[in-house]
Image (tube, rainbow, N blue to C red):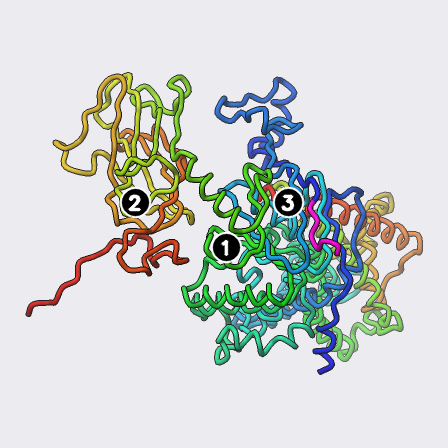
Amino acid sequence: MKPIVEVQNLSKLFRLGAIGASSLRESLELLLRKKRTAPAVAPENQIPSDRAGEEPNSFWGLRDVSFTVQPGEVVGIVGRNGAGKSTLLKILSRITEPTSGRAILRGRVVSLLEVGTGFHPELSGRENIFLNGAILGMKRNEIAAKFDEIVAFAEVGPFLDTPVKRYSSGMYVRLAFAVAAHLEPEILVVDEVLAVGDAAFQKKCLGKMSDVARAGRTVLFVSHNMQALQSLCTRAVHLEQGRVAAIGTAQAIVAEYLSRISSATGEKRWPIESAPGNEFCRLTTIRVVTSAGSNGSVLPSKHDVVVDMEFHAEQLHQGLCVGFDLTNSEGVTVLRSYQTDGASENWPAVRVGGNHWRCVIPAGLLNGGVYFLCPRIGIHNVSWIVSIDGAVEFELMLDHGVSPFWNSLSGSNRPGLVAPILQWQEAVL
Amino acid sequence: MLVMAEVGTPREYEIVIEPSQGWLKVKWDELWEYRDLIILLVQRDFISRYKQTALGPVWHVLQPLIMALVYAVIFGRIAGIPTDGIPTPLFYLCGLLPWNYFSQNITTGGATFINNAHIFGKVYFPRLAVPISIVVANLIAFALQIIPFAIFFAWYKLTGDHAPTVRLTWWLLLFPLPLLHVAVLSLAVSLLMAASTAKYRDLVHLNQFIIQIWMFVTPIIYPLSKIPQQWHWLVWANPMSVPVEAFRLCLLGHGALRPAEVMISLAITILLLFAGIAVFQRVERTVVDSA
């Protein structure tokens, strides 16, 4: 049997922001600068030679990716952020073109990179079903044939003629997923869309996905939910820095992936001569460890999360504030902390030369998920010295709850940004 | 039930994704496959445009009416620009019919990539469907604009003073031809503008400027007879001139077009269309990467 998806040496070269000018002025400036001298590039922006393409200031988002998928297979794609998963899906969905290589798809493709693309708030649910279906590549009569099923799945019957801007977010997501789920393409490409909606709806979506798979359709599925990947997928592809790191059974790949990311250190170091900062503070290290001492990028939530910062001060400044933002994978700032937050007698002293501070985020506060440490150092009310988004990435496994519903491995996190266990008692009147 | 049967029949598909070569490889069959999408985009445009406004479609009647009256006062009375004996409101209304359709098309069509950046980044469909749907959707506004024109026409005809200049002729039946010409020309210009603004946002402002200037170099507020003979070639080099003159010929029975001028205008239009398709395609391949 011919494979339904054949990916052959697919590569995609991205140009970095500095060169891909976004305004006419930048373009003109660039042109003038090119004439005079070669463009000056800050050392930290330079690409290591193994990642550089033919052009300067570019990098390979995908490099020589090859694999095949047989009809009816459900293939998971795993990898860290920036490993090329989204780029691969975008190329297979024909949203962007590869730089070289090719892919052959032997069937109609529907890609769900987002739920509800093209929904128009002013249009009613009914009108949006047709519009969204057509955007995803369905014909009007195909949508009409599936219409009742879509409405039933989405549970929006009474609101069919209401503009979707009046829908609750839950209804909106249900309707959008319902349209996509009933498309019946030969190849379905799904990106992390199951991360939306409430737990009951997620379960329903996963159910629908496995129906699709059982009906013999081919599915390419990207998710950070390893549980869902293992239960849905037959095979998996592990991408790392744009290349295929491994292909195999879903079980094997998930195990390999988890072991590999947990051996990566949740740490960022700079040599002193190129450390970000100025004479008052040069940040040389920021890392995350747990109180149990494990220094990896996947940490259990039942231990304290310790943020370690090392910096060098040539001169002292009264107003130096050293801290960090903790942001989650959606980019929401979960918390910000500075050494100056508490009473001044408790502040650690800044010394000329090396300083090594740590800050403890107490165990049992944070929810499971991927987090980023963003160092924020500045002179109070004057200026920023260091501000780096996502300097360190780490993942927290939710395991501090006693109940089985509190476990990342049970498939979902606790709803909420944080997941502290609070005290409950009888109110005494 | 017939519908169900159609759904069940899978078709042989083979999609090859690779870096594309060539400038003019439009998958017309694929665009045809997506014709339902074009219809639904037209419908979306229509519904979303009129749902939020109190007066709804009435705007399309009022806007040219007010414009024509303002022109009649400023250009007709104050500046004293003659209109070849045609009653001034009728002269301007007739010129504004193709012009408003044209400028609406290129204003929205020229922002195709900007307005749809999000959707283009998430789902594939032939991108040409968007500017095409805009050109079709604006036909509704065009049809509404005919109402004030028809009322003025009937009034001048019935009051009788202007009988020699306000004429119903057999040319009227041909007016879909210049309309089609405007549609194709505006699609071509939309594609060129959409491609340029996708790369450089700054050009949005330049494009607005171009639209304003373009109106004044098109014989809308003045008749061709007022242009000195040695400048006529400049007017005819503007591909919008012929359809505007053709509208006057068809709707007012006034004026004349020489075949050579029509040919030049059509040739420029087709040239622009090919250029538009080429650059639009060039941009659509990788525009998502820089967004």
The image quadrant of residue B100 is bottom right
In the image, residue B93 sits, relative to residue A324, either above or below, namely: below
Residue B265, position as x, y percentages in the image? 85, 52
Q: Is residue A419 left or right of residue A91?
A: left
Q: Quadrant of the N terminus of chain B?
A: bottom right
Taking depth in this image into account, of B229 and A207 the one nearest to the observer is A207
Q: Decide if residue B213 is in sight here.
A: no
Q: Residues within 10 Å of mark 1 (few under 14, many from 20)?
A: some
Q: Left or right: B64 with respect to A158?
A: right
Q: Which residues are magenta?
A: A1-7
In the rendered image, residue A288, in percent from the top left (x then y), is placed at 33, 36
Picture quarter containing residue B166? bottom right
Residue type at mark 1 is Gln
Mark 1 — residue?
A230
Q: Which residue is mark 2?
A: A335
Circle 3 is placed at which residue position?
A: B287
